[in-house]
Image (spheres, grey):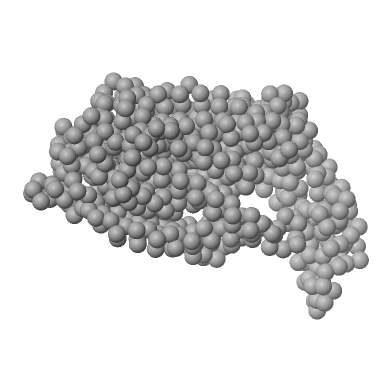
């Protein structure tokens, strides 16, 4: 790699072009990827009206919404770029991106404005996606049209670093803010940190500063000389969309570029960077700061290979470097991610081997827990069991069972899981009777009545095959009726109440809601499952002392190098596939369908597959199948382009 600079040295004017285009695009990717890096917090802030598993998938779906509209942005801004020029088009795109990102930082959360919060969030994500759809094609085309023949791979490879550098920058800013604002907002046990409550907004608000810098830089650029020459000669297209997609000869190349290049490139890119980050935090339960540092380290090591493979593609060709990256991903993804589990959370790896978890239920009772609009309720016994295991990051297998019944087997321990409707139906009458008897006992006899009720509740929970987890040696943490009512009677609200009977009724109502039959059954399931998993060796989170950071960086860097192989040469190849007059439109659409749809929906799709199957590695089938498609189509039908003249 030492002689790369010598053989492809940039003169001052071209260095300015590459730097200005790349830096502006880095900032745009930074804006776009902040959301993905903060998906878990976004879920709690804007989708708190749904259950935790659905909320995280909903957050990922909103993240993917930005990708869904990227092809439409490619059409709108691609046409504009072919009509009026490259420079002014990607000046517009960065303005839209920066303002939309700043808006996310100002947006009130679900608790403040309800459903308006996620709706506005999705609208802002759609605007980001539209802007990004016009950005990449403009920057890549602009740089390639300034590059000398034989060095387009090297020149455009700097543009290829921008997505990774934007992600890298977002991770560093988030890490700095998370570290700076790590103190809890209160002294209460389990209180969230300042970053989780409000500090997450800072990285979004900083985008307004980056926007100013980016606009200032891009205003200094001149139009592409190739575009200027074409306009001067009167050869510019008057209908770039019709020429690009209404002409079969060109449309065929667009389709081949999508299926034989960008689709596979996209899934390798998103698996190596985003899915890897989600896998560390959501599946292996490695803390967010450590996960971000691991990804940042692998990106820092791997990013120079974008330049290397771009340079190499000028020497030996672009096609087979991309195809080799797809092949390596296909062959090694499963062993690499299993190794990441082994070195990232060895306790989970060992427990899943020694004490496998099995969910037994009628398949008809089990939903595919993919709910992008957050309206579905997953309340069957099977769904409750699987949702609890997914939240815990525990892999499981499925066995068919009787209709209406579900259970979780952990080693030799069986934990029954009852439908939410059944629990509600079985406990409503008991809770009503319990409330009446406690109120009737009055202040003098209520504690004795509560003790009797606690015994009956414990018997009911035990009879259901669960453990009553309400008792606790610490009275402030106990959820028994006796403890809750004792605390209620000692409260200032009760002591100072003018109507003791009415206030006693409120104390009883709150106690029954927290420690009555329904709560005891639900908490009993969660507590029994948690205890069984702990006994079997399943950790609640990765033990920092057991995380092998060195090996994880090595494995994550391998994934990043795959990314550089498929992504480093692809900008030059896409530019070279299409003629100047319709280049912006033609190359942008396959790129953004590939990266916006095939790649952007990867985290959402992969996690839904994992939730359905219980296999923490099953989500990898999605990128493997898409990469295999690209390998076959690309190898058979995509021509080599490195020696083409792009001035026609």
Q: Is residue 633 left or right of residue 427?
A: left
Outermost residue toward the bottom? 498
Residue located 57% across and 37% down the image: 279
Above or below, 594 relative to 455: above
In the rendered image, the quadrant that contains the N terminus is top left
Residue located 53% across and 61% down the image: 202
Residue 566 visible in the displayed image: no
| Rendering quarter of residue 544 | top right
Residue located 26% across and 30% down the image: 642
Residue located 66% across and 57% down the image: 182
State how many labels appear: 0
Residue 52, x across and y down, in percent? 59, 47
Residue closest to the eye, 151 or 212 = 151
Residue 74, x across and y down, in percent? 28, 47
Residue closest to the eye, 12 or 213 = 12
Residue closest to the eye, 1 or 492 = 1
Outermost residue toward the left? 234
In the rendered image, the quadrant that contains the C terminus is top left
| Rendering quarter of residue 540 | top right
Residue 502 visible in the displayed image: yes
Residue 59, x across and y down, in percent? 50, 49
Residue closest to the eye, 46 or 185 = 185
Residue 301, x across and y down, in percent? 52, 37
Q: In this view, does 155 lie to the left or right of 613?
A: left
């Amino acid at each position: 790699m030492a002689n790369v600079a010598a053989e492809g040295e940039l003169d001052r004017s071209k260095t300015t072009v590459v730097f200005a285009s790349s830096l502006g695009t880095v900032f745009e990717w930074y804006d776009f990827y902040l959301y993905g890096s903060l998906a878990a917090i976004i879920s709690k802030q804007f989708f708190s009206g749904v259950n935790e598993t659905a909320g995280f998938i909903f957050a990922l779906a909103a993240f993917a919404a930005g990708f869904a509209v990227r092809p439409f942005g490619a059409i709108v801004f691609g046409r504009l770029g072919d009509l009026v020029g490259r420079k002014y088009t990607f000046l517009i795109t960065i303005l839209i991106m920066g303002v939309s990102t700043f808006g996310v930082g100002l947006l009130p959360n679900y608790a403040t404005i309800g459903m308006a919060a996620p709706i506005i969030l999705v609208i802002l994500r759609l605007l980001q996606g539209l802007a990004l759809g016009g950005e990449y094609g403009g920057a890549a085309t602009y740089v390639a049209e300034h590059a000398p023949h034989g060095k387009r791979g090297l020149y455009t490879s700097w543009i290829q670093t921008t997505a990774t550098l934007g992600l890298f920058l977002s991770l560093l800013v988030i890490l700095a803010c998370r570290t700076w604002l790590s103190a809890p907002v209160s002294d209460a046990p389990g209180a969230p940190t300042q970053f989780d409550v409000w500090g997450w907004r800072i990285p979004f608000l900083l985008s307004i500063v980056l926007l100013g810098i980016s606009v200032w830089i891009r205003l200094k650029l001149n139009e592409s000389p190739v575009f200027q020459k074409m306009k001067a000669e009167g050869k510019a297209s008057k209908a770039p969309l019709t020429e690009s997609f209404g002409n079969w000869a060109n449309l065929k190349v667009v389709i081949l570029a999508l299926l034989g290049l960008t689709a596979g490139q996209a899934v390798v890119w998103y698996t190596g960077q985003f899915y890897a980050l989600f896998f560390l935090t959501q599946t292996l339960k490695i803390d967010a700061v450590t996960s971000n540092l691991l990804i940042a380290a692998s990106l820092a090591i791997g990013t120079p290979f974008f330049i290397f493979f771009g340079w190499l593609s000028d020497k030996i060709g672009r096609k087979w470097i991309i195809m080799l990256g797809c092949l390596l991903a296909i062959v090694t993804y499963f062993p690499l991610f299993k190794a990441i589990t082994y070195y990232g959370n060895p306790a989970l790896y060992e427990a899943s081997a020694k004490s496998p978890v099995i969910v037994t239920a009628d398949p008809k009772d089990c939903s595919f827990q993919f709910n992008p609009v957050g309206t579905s309720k997953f309340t069957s016994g099977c769904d409750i069991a699987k949702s609890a295991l997914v939240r815990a990051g525990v892999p499981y297998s499925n066995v068919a069972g009787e209709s209406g019944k579900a259970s979780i087997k952990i080693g030799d321990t069986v934990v029954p899981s009852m439908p939410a409707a059944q629990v509600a139906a079985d406990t409503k009458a008991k809770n009503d009777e319990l409330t009446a008897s406690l109120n009737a006992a009055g202040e003098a006899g209520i504690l004795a009545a509560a003790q009797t009720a606690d015994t009956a509740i414990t018997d009911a929970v035990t009879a259901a095959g669960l453990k009553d987890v309400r008792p606790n040696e610490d009275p402030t943490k106990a959820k028994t009726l006796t403890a809750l009512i004792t605390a209620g009677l000692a409260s200032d609200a009760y002591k100072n109440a003018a109507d003791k009977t009415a206030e006693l009724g409120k104390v009883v109502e709150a106690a029954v809601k927290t420690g009555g039959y329904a709560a005891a059954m639900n908490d009993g399931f969660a507590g029994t499952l948690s205890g069984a998993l702990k006994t079997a060796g399943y950790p609640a989170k990765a033990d920092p002392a057991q995380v092998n950071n060195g090996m994880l960086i090595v494995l994550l860097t391998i994934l990043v190098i795959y990314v550089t192989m498929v992504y480093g040469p692809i900008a030059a190849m896409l530019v070279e596939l299409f003629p100047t007059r319709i280049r912006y439109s033609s190359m942008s659409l396959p790129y953004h369908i590939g990266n916006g749809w095939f790649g952007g929906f990867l985290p959402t799709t992969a996690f839904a597959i994992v939730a359905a199957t219980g296999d923490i590695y099953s989500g990898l089938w999605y990128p493997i199948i898409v990469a295999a498609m690209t390998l076959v189509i690309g190898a058979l039908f995509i021509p080599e382009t490195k020696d083409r003249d792009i001035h026609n």
